[in-house]
Amino acid sequence: MARARQRAHPVPVTEPKYRIRALHTDSTVTVYQAYPPEIGLPAAEGGRFPPVWQRDRMTWIKPSFPWMMYRCGWGTKEGQKTVLAVEITREGFEWALAHACLSHYEHGLHADRATWKRQLKRAPARVQWDPERDLLLRPLPHRSLQLGLAGEAARLYADEWTVRITDVTPLAQAIHQHVREGDLDAARQLLPRERPYPVREESLAHLYR
């Protein structure tokens, strides 16, 4: 990889450890997933997940484009070569957050492990917070939301919450090319303009400590 001409991540020192950052409008929020072409391409073409998309399995959605690039290797990993931007209703997204359980036991947040396990088993959604990534896919000090949907939540996501599905694989490839060339300023110009998602802090109180 060519030597970067700029720092990969100018990070504000005031950035909180836990915060949802996303591309969003007054009514929708964009999340990302990556699939093999036989699922991703029909989903983008039809604007809905095809029947082959299994609604009875856990599916993870990511509001962070850089974290999705870390996960799918800029769309180069096997089974993840079609990167989708899925625009869903904010109402659905916030329902999932409200009904989610943290994916791991956290002392001081959960009464005990047995209580956490019961909550996790019942919850239609689960949350984990992973280090956000910069353009070189290095971990940052603050965390990125990953939202797992199962059962009722997965079905609602696929059949009711989804507003639009776009194939953003070419965007991922274009940004990756700039990164490979060391032109991080050009890469940064192409990134989706993610900003703090306006959810009340108390609404996330059950999802981190």
Image (cartoon, rainbow, N blue to C red):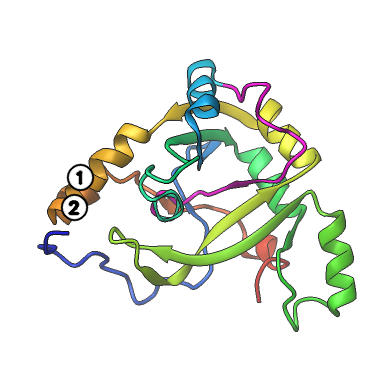
The answer, for residue 17, to whether it is visible in the render is: yes
Decide whether the magenta segment is chiefly helix, strand or loop. loop
Look at the image and say whether residue 54 sits in the magenta stretch.
Answer: yes
**64 versus 164 height, above or below:** below
Q: Residues within 10 Å of mark 1 (few under 14, many from 20)?
A: some
**For the point 20% across and 53% down, which residue is it?**
179
Residue in front for this viewpoint, 143 or 58: 58
Estimate the x, y position of residue 6 in percent, counting from the top left: 14, 64
Image disc number at residue 115: none
Q: Is residue 20 above or below residue 170?
A: below
Quarter the N terminus occupies: bottom left
Q: Which is nearer the eye, 132 or 97?
A: 132
Coordinates of residue 27 in the picture (x, y in percent): 56, 34
Please name whichever residue, 26 or 147, is drawn nearer the observer in this view of the structure: 147
Residue type at mark 2 is Arg
Q: Residue at image x 85%, y 67%?
A: 117
Relative depth, front residue between 109 and 45: 45
Dots 1, 2 in contact, CB < 8 A: yes
Residue 78 placed where, x, y %? Answer: 46, 43
Residue 93 position by quadrant: top right
Q: Which residue carries the number 2 mark?
A: 180
Instruction: Identify the residue position indicated by label 1 in the image.
Output: 177
Magenta region: 48-66
In the depicted structure, whether residue 58 falls above or below residue 165: below
Looking at this rendering, what residue extends furthest in the top direction? 46
Q: Quadrant of residue 113?
A: bottom right
- The amino acid type found where label 1 is placed reads Gln
Q: Is residue 179 left or right of residue 129?
A: left
Which residue is at 37% across, 44% downward? 76
Which residue is drawn at the image coordinates 49% and 73% (left, top)? 17
Q: Secondary structure at mark 2?
A: helix
